[in-house]
Image (spheres, rainbow, N blue to C red):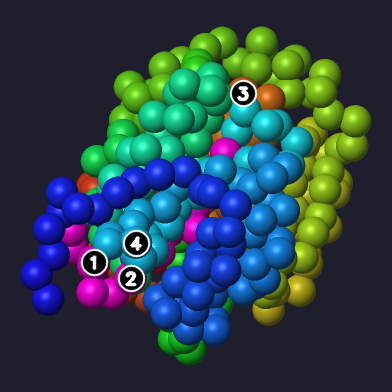
Amino acid sequence: MTIFPSAIQIQSYQSGDDKKISQLFREVYGDAYVYPDIYLPRLIDDYQVTGQWYSALAFYQGCLIGHASLVKDAVHQNHAELALIAVEPDFQGYGIAKSLSSYLCHYAKEQNYKLLTMKQVCSHPKSQYIARNLGFYSTALMLDYVDSPFGLPEPESIVQGILPLKSLPLPKLNWPQPWRNWVDQIRQYVGESLPYAQQVCRRSFTSEPFSIKKSGHRLEITLYNVPSDFLSEVIDFPAGQLVYLKLPACEESLTLCPSLKKGGFRFAGLCPDEHNGWFLLWLRGYQLAPYQFHDRGTQHLYQMELGEY
């Protein structure tokens, strides 16, 4: 089949596209896509109408061949994830995923979004390539994050990319020596601010000291303050559980690095918090596996600690 790229049209979601989107994901991912909502056309339409999703679609000769969406954060409507990317197999390799993503990034800037994130699939290097070309910078590794969307027995790992559209500086901290070159690369991308202002801002918006939730096979624990007594209980948690632990990026958290490493946790990067600050991400209970990353910064992050689990 001869495909003429000039005949590919990119446009926003229109009423009636919901069933076409659901069918596209069945063709690309079968019945194993990690977000089951995509198999329910009614939900797709509801999300578009309420503004929870903003989708871009690619058509060729009237047929839907590609989809991507901005999925808004449930709390902060000016934060969104670039996600739900699918391209019909016969049309892969024509830059459709990149065109859809560029369309959505341009829309986000026009709408004054503050932050876009993107989860890049480790087993699919093209997603890392697209993120890099769009200006996303990789700041964290989420190993064994979800079941494979391609039906593989091993869980899928994720590279988290960020694209700040407003200021999102790192706090100025006394980072551990092994991390400094890696942190310097991120600081050159997002800038740096004083730690005290960041801490006050974060804590003033937070009513609970911590949150815990189970997502699939991973347990996500977020500490908004750093109570050492509770942290010791987290470290003593049964070792067979995959744990994602987030601590506020502050000097107090950095003093706990030796205890965390002794307890089997490994530093996995930095994640933006909900109030223009940052979290340290620590993992425990993941499987070791060989990875090839598109950029040196992500490879460096993996080799610092995660690859020596």
Residue positioned 47% across, 21% down in the render: 110
Q: Is residue 242 visible?
A: no
Q: Position of residue 206 (x, y in %)?
A: 84, 29
Quadrant for the N terminus in the image: bottom left
Residue lying furthest bottom in this view?
153
Task: State the SS at label 2.
Answer: loop
Q: Mark 4: which amino acid?
A: Gly
Quote the CA–CA distance across marks 2 and 4. Answer: 14 Å
Are the residues flagged by discs 1 and 2 in contact, CB closer than 8 Å?
yes
Residue positioned 39% across, 29% down in the render: 106
Are the residues flagged by discs 1 and 4 in contact, CB closer than 8 Å?
no
Q: Position of residue 140 (x, y in %)?
A: 46, 48
Are the residues flagged by discs 3 and 2 in contact, CB closer than 8 Å?
no
* Vertical side of 171 occupied by 252: above or below: below
Quote the CA–CA distance across marks 1 and 2. Answer: 7 Å
Between marks 3 and 2 in the image, the one whose residue lies nearer the viewer? 2
Mark 2 crowdedness (10 Å alpha carbons): few <14, some 14-19, many ≥20: some
Q: Is residue 92 visible?
A: yes
Q: Which residue is mark 4?
A: 62
Residue positioned 56% across, 43% down in the render: 54
* Vertical side of 175 occupied by 29: above or below: below
Residue lying furthest right in this view?
207
* Vertical side of 275 occupied by 247: above or below: below
Q: Which residue is mark 3?
A: 276
Place residue 238 in its image quadrant. Answer: bottom right
Q: Which residue is mark 1?
A: 92
Between marks 3 and 4 in the image, the one whose residue lies nearer the viewer? 4
Count the marks: how many?
Answer: 4
Q: Position of residue 160 (x, y in %)?
A: 46, 49
Instruction: Point out the stretch of residues depicted in magenta.
Output: 80-94
Quote the CA–CA distance across marks 3 and 4. Answer: 42 Å
